[in-house]
Amino acid sequence: MSDKEIWVIAEYDEKGIKKNTWESVSAARLLSEHLKLKPAVVILGNGIQRFAEELSKEVELVYSIEHLLLSKYDSNAYVSSIYSLIKDKKPAIIIASATFRGKDYIPMLSAKLDCGLISDCVGFEVKDTILFKRAVYGGRLMAAVMYEGAELLIVTIRPRSFEHRKIETAKGEIIQFKPNLEQNDILVAVREIIKEVGKRPDLSEADIIVSGGRGMKGAENFKLLEELADILGGAVGASRAVVDEGWMPHLFQIGQTGRVVSPMLYIACGISGAPQHLAGMSTSKCIVAINKDPNAPIFKIADYGIVDDLFKVVPVMIQEIKSEGTRNDKGGIFAWKMLL
Amino acid sequence: MKIIVCVKEVPDTAIALKIKSDSTEIETENIPWVINPYDEYAMEEALRLKERFGGNVTAITVGRKRAENILRNCFALGADRALIINGESFKDNLAVSKILTKVIKNMGYDVILCGKESVDYGYAQTGQIIAGLLRIPCVSAIKKLDISPSTKEAVCHREIEGGLEVVKCSLPAVFTAQKGLNVPRYASLSGIMKAKKTKIETLEPDALDLNLSNYKAKIKIINLSYPPKRPEGKIIQGTLPDTAKELVRSLREARYI
């Protein structure tokens, strides 16, 4: 193995390292095997010892960039801190998550380094060279992309595209790195965070999504979908029609001009399945469609379909699930979500 | 207030896409092109800033001659100036962002607005790269923008997973527009008539005295494909409540719930 490193930049919240970071670690391991690179992870913040230790259980090398001015996220402070570590260690590849945060600062980092950035990858294909796969035209086509630059490459990865394969390594080494930051390096100050989804998981992290379309008939009826989502530990989504009608905020929109999701289970209620909606959810593992119209295009991609009135179907489903419980109730793999 | 809006033409999102035989591009013969939907939000926000605080709005694009149409559209909406940079020599997003920066740098600016991504290739990088190269603040995926010209500060709402961040920065700055920022207006008839007669400035890269080796593409698409087809699903036959019960049973059996 060469001395060149492949880095993952970690994300965390008060509950610990985020799932998307572990997925990136697994993606980095795949690349590191082919390219003979040494995996490492970079974490930034203030008072992050416990997160660095959590990472060191699964990764051989952890760079912990700590500074008081990194207590809150700022793209410029992130970029200049990571930049100085890059200049010191010269990694070959850097991987970050294509989250709102990753999408915010990573292009600025690539600008500063004048290096290639392949954003929002959903997979790799190893041939003579490595092809990075990404969804284009809002998921209606797939592109295989090659890197032609000579220097460092940065890749961002769409959450839920890689599976986290847990590897227990011997306790990894944690290397502290103190960046040279001053108050005027903070260009965008975060004043406040407004939570909009409440206790439910975010769409990009949810294993189960219950989604409503025009067939929901009004904002007040989304309570029914929320009830189903809650007993499944899932999230609620909506089609563009619903958002355009003002029944749900845009934050919940799934499709080409909304969020692209890839849950284990997607339950589409009263959604006809316009191409721009299908683009945002067709990579879901299992799709259920409930719609009165037997000719709705959604049935063409659904694994299970019921042609009936959703207002009659969903209550029966809720009752059935409640009577026998879900894997969730047994403290299974969904238990982590209940913490969110 | 000098406001610059970066726009891009994209294939109309309503059309069916066909991949060319060389598998690296889509068929573009006779397809309708529109302004990237996120850029429409950026343009609308620019026009609102101009209406509130005065100043002028410049729309700028990197592309081929055809893209003049979206610039005319920007004129019709109320832009004061439009500029097209002949984009044949810039093949990837970094190169396009660099040339935009080069041109913007010479124009002067208080606010630069972009769409948060384009709905064709969806790299979601341009605004951030421009800000990075100009060394000015950037707030991406904004849903609300409040500007105070006297203090030269902006407070905005930026989308994050599950909510919003309220952030503050100084001007000049780059903002990238998320859906929800505003509802774009339609062009007025008089706007459309005026736009027909307005001059669109064209800039050839040669005139910019570039060292083209700095603008070489680092990223190349080598193949486009259709996503794999999903296997034929099954419609659960029968009547309620049996169908719904059968659905729950199947999902449980497959361990989805």
Image (cartoon, coloured by chain):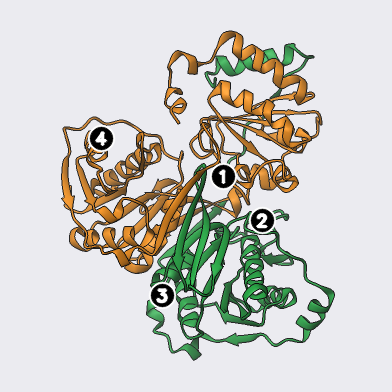
Question: For mark 3, does the 10 Å Cα neighbourhood hold few (<14), some (14 to 19), or many (20 or more) residues?
Answer: some
The quadrant in which the N terminus of chain B is found is bottom right
Q: Can residue B249 be seen in this view?
A: no
Q: Which mark is residue B196?
A: none
Report which residue position mark 1 lands on. A260
Do the dots labelled 3 and 2 sit on one chain? Answer: yes
Name the residue at the right extreme: B189
State the orange chain.
Answer: A
Name the residue at the top extreme: A323
The CA distance from mark 3 to mark 2 is 38 Å
Mark toward the viewer: 1 or 4: 4
Contact (Cβ within 8 Å) of mark 4 with mark 3: no
Do the dots labelled 1 and 4 sit on one chain? Answer: yes
Report which residue position mark 2 lands on. B18
Q: What is the secondary structure assignment of the residue under circle 2?
A: loop
The quadrant in which the C terminus of chain B is found is top right
- Amino acid tagged 1: Val
Q: What is the secondary structure assignment of the residue under circle 1?
A: loop
Image location (x, y in percent) of residue B208: 47, 88
Residue lying at 41% horizontally and 71% vertically, measured from the top left: B136
Report which residue position mark 3 lands on. B134
Question: For mark 2, does the 10 Å Cα neighbourhood hold few (<14), some (14 to 19), or many (20 or more) residues?
Answer: some
- Amino acid tagged 2: Lys
Question: For mark 4, does the 10 Å Cα neighbourhood hold few (<14), some (14 to 19), or many (20 or more) residues?
Answer: some
- Compared with A48, B18 (above or below) is below
Image location (x, y in percent) of residue A312: 77, 20
- Amino acid tagged 4: Glu
Colour chain B appears in: green
